[in-house]
Image (cartoon, rainbow, N blue to C red):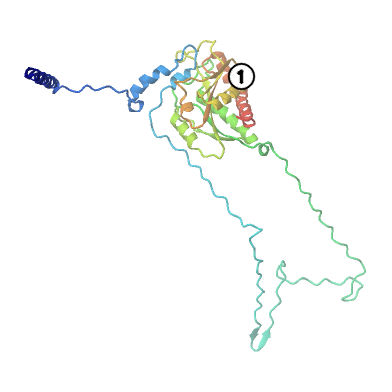
C-alpha cells in the first residue's frame, strides 16, 4: 500500500517536471504572426493597379487609338474654375388683388397775391392753359357779313375718327414651341496645344487638326440648337488649351441647371500609324462610346450612332464600351456621358471628306437630329 502511494507521487512529480522544461525551451522565441489579407483601401496606388490590371480588357487590332492616348489620368492640378453663374432674383411686384394703390394727389395751383406798387394794385394774370406757348388762346375774327358775337350758318363738320388698330396675334416660332428637357454639355475635344491629333499634310498644304474640326462641328450645332430652343452649355469655348480633361469635367459637374444634364463629347478618330503617315485604308467609319453599365448612356449612344451613320454613309463601327481604359470624360463626369468618333482623320480618303464643309454640315445636323430624338422621347 505504501509502495503504491509512493509510485503515484512519483508519477505526478515526473509530469510536472516535463511541463516546466517544455516552457523553458520555448521561452524567449518570437510569436508567429498570421498574415491577414490586406484591404484595398490600405494598398498603395501601385499595388491597386497591379490587382486591377487583371480586370481590364486589352485593346488590340484596329481599336480606338484615342483610348490608348487617354488611358492615364493627367497630373492633378486645380483646373481654372469657370465664371460662376450669376442668378439675379426676379423683382417682386405688388399683387393687384390685395394691394390698394392710392390715387395720385394733385395739389391746387398756388395763385400769388396781387402786387402793390405805390398804392396801385397790379392784377396777377390768370394761369395759362396747359399745352400753350405762354400766350392765351386767340379770339377768332368774326366771319364777313356777321355781327360780332353771332355765329355763322355753316355747320361745323365733326372730326374724322381715328380707326382702332386690330391686334395681331404673334405667330409662334419653333423656339417657343419646344420645351427643353435636358441641358446638353457640349464638349469639343482637345485644343491647339494638344500634341499630335492632326492628319498628315496633303500635297496642296491642307491638314486636318482635330481640335479645329471638333469646334467647327459644335459651332454649327449651336446655331441649329438656338433656332430650335434646345438648352446647351459650351464646356470649352477656348481654343488655346491642351486636352484640359480635368477642366472639362470640373466645369460640367459644377454647372448649375434646373434641367438634368447630359454630356456629349465630339471627336474625330485616329488609327494606329506612324506620326505623319496615313493609316491603313481599311480602318474607317463611325463609333460612339458610353460608360460601361450605364443603361441610359448605352441607349443615347445608339441614337447618335444611328443618325451619324445614316447622314454620312460611313462604315458602322457600332457603339463601344469596356471595363478598363475608358475615356477620362466618361469616367469622371457626374452625369450620363457619351463620346462620338466621327471618321478617321489619318485615313486619307476619309480625311478629305472631313475637310469638306458640306460633310461637316451633315455631321452637325446628325448630332442635332439625335438630340431632338432624345429630347422628344422618354430616355
Left-right relation of 136 to 15: right
Residue 190 in sight here: no
Q: Nearer the viewer, residue 351 or 332?
A: 332
Q: Nearer the viewer, residue 225 or 41?
A: 41
Q: Residue at x 20, y 23 (%)?
A: 31
Splitting the image into 4 quarters, where does residue 116 fall?
A: bottom right
User: Local crowd at mark 1 within 10 Å, few (<14), some, or many (≥20)?
Assistant: many
Determine whether the residue tagged by mark 1 lies in a helix, strand or loop: helix
Q: Is residue 70 above or below residue 95?
A: above
Residue furthest out toward the front: 1
Give the number of callouts.
Answer: 1
Quarter of the image where the N terminus is located: top left
Q: Residue at x 63, y 61 (%)?
A: 99
Q: Residue at x 63, y 21 (%)?
A: 311
Give the residue at mark 1: 309
Residue furthest out toward the bottom: 119
Query: Percent position (x, y) of residue 50?
Result: 36, 19
Query: Percent position (x, y) of residue 49?
Result: 37, 21
Q: Nearer the viewer, residue 301 or 78?
A: 301
Residue 62 in sight here: yes
Splitting the image into 4 quarters, where does residue 377 fall?
A: top right
Query: Percent position (x, y) of residue 158?
Result: 86, 62
Q: Nearer the viewer, residue 169 or 260?
A: 260
Left-right relation of 168 to 87: right
Amino acid at each position: 500500500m505504501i509502495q503504491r502511494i509512493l509510485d503515484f507521487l512519483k508519477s505526478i512529480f515526473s509530469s510536472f517536471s516535463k511541463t516546466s522544461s517544455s516552457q523553458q525551451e520555448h521561452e524567449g522565441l518570437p510569436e508567429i504572426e498570421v498574415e491577414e489579407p490586406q484591404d484595398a483601401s490600405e494598398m498603395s496606388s501601385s499595388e491597386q493597379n497591379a490587382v486591377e490590371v487583371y480586370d481590364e480588357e486589352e485593346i488590340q487590332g484596329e481599336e480606338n487609338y484615342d483610348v490608348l492616348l487617354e488611358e492615364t489620368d493627367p497630373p492633378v492640378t486645380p483646373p481654372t474654375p469657370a465664371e460662376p453663374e450669376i442668378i439675379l432674383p426676379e423683382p417682386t411686384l405688388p399683387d393687384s388683388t390685395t394691394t390698394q394703390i392710392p390715387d395720385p394727389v394733385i395739389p391746387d395751383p398756388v395763385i400769388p397775391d396781387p402786387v402793390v406798387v405805390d398804392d396801385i394794385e397790379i392784377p396777377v394774370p390768370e394761369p395759362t392753359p396747359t399745352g400753350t406757348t405762354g400766350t392765351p388762346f386767340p379770339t377768332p375774327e368774326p366771319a364777313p357779313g356777321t355781327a360780332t358775337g353771332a355765329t355763322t350758318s355753316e355747320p361745323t363738320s365733326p372730326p374724322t375718327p381715328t380707326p382702332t388698330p386690330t391686334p395681331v396675334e404673334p405667330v409662334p416660332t419653333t423656339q417657343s414651341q419646344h420645351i427643353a428637357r435636358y441641358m446638353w454639355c457640349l464638349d469639343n475635344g482637345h485644343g491647339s496645344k494638344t500634341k499630335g491629333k492632326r492628319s498628315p499634310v496633303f500635297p496642296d498644304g491642307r491638314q486636318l487638326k482635330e481640335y479645329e474640326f471638333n469646334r467647327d462641328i459644335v459651332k454649327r450645332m449651336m446655331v441649329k440648337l438656338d433656332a430650335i430652343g434646345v438648352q446647351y452649355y459650351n464646356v470649352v469655348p477656348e481654343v488655346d488649351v491642351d486636352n484640359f480633361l480635368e477642366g472639362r469635367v470640373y466645369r460640367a459637374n459644377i454647372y448649375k441647371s434646373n434641367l438634368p444634364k447630359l454630356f456629349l463629347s465630339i471627336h474625330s478618330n485616329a488609327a494606329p500609324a506612324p506620326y505623319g503617315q496615313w493609316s491603313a485604308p481599311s480602318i474607317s467609319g463611325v463609333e460612339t462610346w458610353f460608360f460601361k453599365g450605364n443603361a441610359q448612356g448605352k441607349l443615347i449612344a445608339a441614337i447618335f450612332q444611328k443618325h451619324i451613320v445614316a447622314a454620312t454613309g460611313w462604315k458602322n463601327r457600332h457603339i463601344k464600351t469596356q471595363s478598363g481604359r475608358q475615356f477620362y470624360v466618361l469616367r469622371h463626369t457626374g452625369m450620363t456621358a457619351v463620346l462620338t468618333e466621327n471618321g478617321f482623320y489619318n485615313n486619307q480618303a476619309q480625311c478629305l471628306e472631313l475637310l469638306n464643309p458640306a460633310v461637316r454640315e451633315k455631321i452637325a445636323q446628325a448630332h442635332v437630329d439625335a438630340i431632338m430624338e432624345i429630347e422628344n422621347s422618354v430616355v
